[in-house]
Amino acid sequence: MPELTREQKIDLLKIIIKIRRFEEKTIQLYQSSRIWGFLHPYIGEEAIAAGACAAINKEDFIISTHRGHGHSIAKGADINQMMAELLGKVTGYCKGRGGSMHIADTELGMLGANGIVGGGIPISLGAGFSCKMEGKGRVVICFFSDGASNNGVFHETLNMAAIFKLPIIYLCENNMYAISMKSCKSIACKDIAKRSSAYDIPGFIVDGSDPEEVYKIVLKSVERARKNEGPSLIEAKTYRFGGHHPNDPATYRDKTEAEYFIREKDPVINYKEKLKKEKIINISEIEKIEADIIKSIEDSIKFAEESPEPKLDKFLQEVRNT
Amino acid sequence: MHEIEYREAIREAVMEEMERDSKVFLIGEDIGVYGGAFQAYKGLLNIFGEERVIDTPISEAAIIGSGIGAAITGYRPIAELMFIDFSALAMDQIVNQAAKIRYMTGDNLKCPLVLRTQGGSGRGIAAQHSQSLEAWFYHIPGLKVVMPSTPYDVKGLLKTAIRDDNVVMFIEHKMMYLLKGPVPEEEYTIPFGVADIKREGTDVTIFAYSNMVHKSLEAAKELEREGISVEVFDPRTLVPLDEHALLKSVRKTGHLVIVTEACERGSVASDISTRVASKAFDNLDAPIKIIAGLNTPIPYNSTLEYACTPHKEDIVEAVKEMLAKS
């Protein structure tokens, strides 16, 4: 496997920072009631989306979750359209009809975040069948969570993907919590990756705070999928730095546990340090990246706020199917 | 014209569409070498191969998910649920995913998916294989609901369903697969939302769909001998509904009887009744009558099973009673 180039590494860092700053901003907007409904920040898990999406191409597909902003950004989504969607504007990816949990875009190959935990898992099969029938070597990454791995569709789907050797990478983001339910209390085996043995497919465990490790393991699975050798199951060990949503204080968690992960496993801090140590990037270059990203996010908020609200008559006209 | 069975009409529609459009494929349980539980896909595996006739494990949610995922990435799948009762195993995929995806994403993801299934009683297969669950899907915005009653209708409507860019619940009836009827040799399609008057009449309108069309036609024949002229109105598609034609028929006859095999409580029939009463109340000469299945699980014993759903005698009696009163 070729080593990541300098440019690729810098791109990974940019994506991780972009997701982090985007999420920090959406939390502020949520707490000031400019975003409403549900919001599930991806803070702490950025390296997974960044590493995974770096291992696939524009024409490949991803399927996302309710905690999906990071996946969209890593797949190349336009943050103006994302922010507009979060603010419910007609210029958003879903014309303001979906909000945080339903961002999708055909052009991007982003087949949808999902409000139902596990809801996207079976949909991956159909995208996999498409790729297989089309025969152009396209693949699907299906992101899901530790919580979703306990839903019955996980079994139906992995079994079927394995039978038909579909080109799908099942990427479980085990952030240790499904709202308040600790994964060690809800999952009978220690590692979700072990469940792969039930379907006779490869299973891998990876440190979800390290984008390069995620990239490498996903790439390996992608190459296998492109060769029609079937699906893989990857479990990325990660941690949800905040609560389930911005107003959840997560009092059900052990304080020292959270402190440990935030101190030791922050993908933004760690990857900056790593690239500095490798002399790939210096402090002023990082500052420049940060400033550019913050500016683009401010611009996206401006774009969203200045965008028009959806019109009720147009909405009704478009959705009426009777 | 040739006389073919309902299931042969399905097969013809599917074959023609698969030959016409390489993006159409089939997925479901026992649809390959077995040809489908009701033999509607007999021989299709040999013609189109395993790539386009995908025989799956017993995994209903995964079947529907496969349909959705393929539909949003450019294919036109026909996913089959062997019995409508099994839709309960796939309800998240049907209701929260398929029905929502196009609307929720602002048209960004299109989902041209046909869900073929069948329901109804009459085979002695009891409460988990005999239900009429169309009301579940009728209730969900984002699903079209098609319930064809003849070989002609099933072929034309299935072809339209396959070409539709939305999710279509295509609900057949297990007692109709062997029913024969005329079907044109040349190609045709039937648009959604266009009802068919299966028999013209002037005294009373019977609104019936799926297998109840045939029971209503039998009743109409008998009532004719007593001098009662019955119009049998077959909507063919419940969503979209040809309300305009229904109101026109009711305004002509002044009487509406709605016949459904489904339980009356929370049924499509009660909704049709409300819709007509609120729009054509002044044209009605008698209260609307609903003849429906009993609010009970379908029993195994054949005498009990028979008693739980409407038959010719029930329809004849209801029509006579209604006309005697008005």
Image (cartoon, coloured by chain):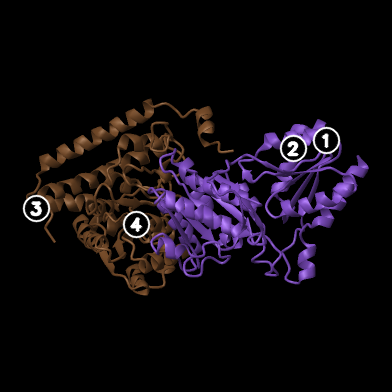
Tag 1 or tag 2, which sits nearer the N-term? 2
Mark nearest the camera among 3 and 1 is 1
Q: Which chain is purple?
A: B
Residue A188 in the image, given as x and y percentages of width and height: 41, 72
Tag 3 or tag 4, which sits nearer the N-term? 4
Q: Is residue B317 above or below residue A14?
A: below
Q: Which residue is mark 4?
A: A133
The residues tagged by marks 2 and 1 sit, at their Cα atoms, a distance apart of 9 Å
Mark nearest the camera among 4 and 1 is 4
Residue at 74 percent across and 37 percent down: it is B276
The chain carrying label 4 is: A
Give the residue at the far right of this rendering: B324
Q: Which residue is mark 1?
A: B284
The residues tagged by marks 2 and 3 sit, at their Cα atoms, a distance apart of 76 Å
The residues tagged by marks 4 and 2 sit, at their Cα atoms, a distance apart of 47 Å
Q: Which residue is mark 2?
A: B276
Residue B214 in the image, given as x and y percentages of width and height: 73, 53
> Helix, strand, or loop for circle 4?
helix
Q: Colour of chain A?
A: brown
Labels 4 & 1 near each other (Cβ < 8 A): no
**Residue type highlighted by circle 4:** Met
Q: Are marks 4 and 2 on the same chain?
A: no
Q: Which residue is mark 3?
A: A277
Residue at 45 percent across and 41 percent down: it is A98
Taking depth in this image into account, of B226 and B292 the one nearest to the observer is B226
**Residue type highlighted by circle 3:** Lys
Which image quadrant is residue B251 in? top right
Mark nearest the camera among 4 and 3 is 4
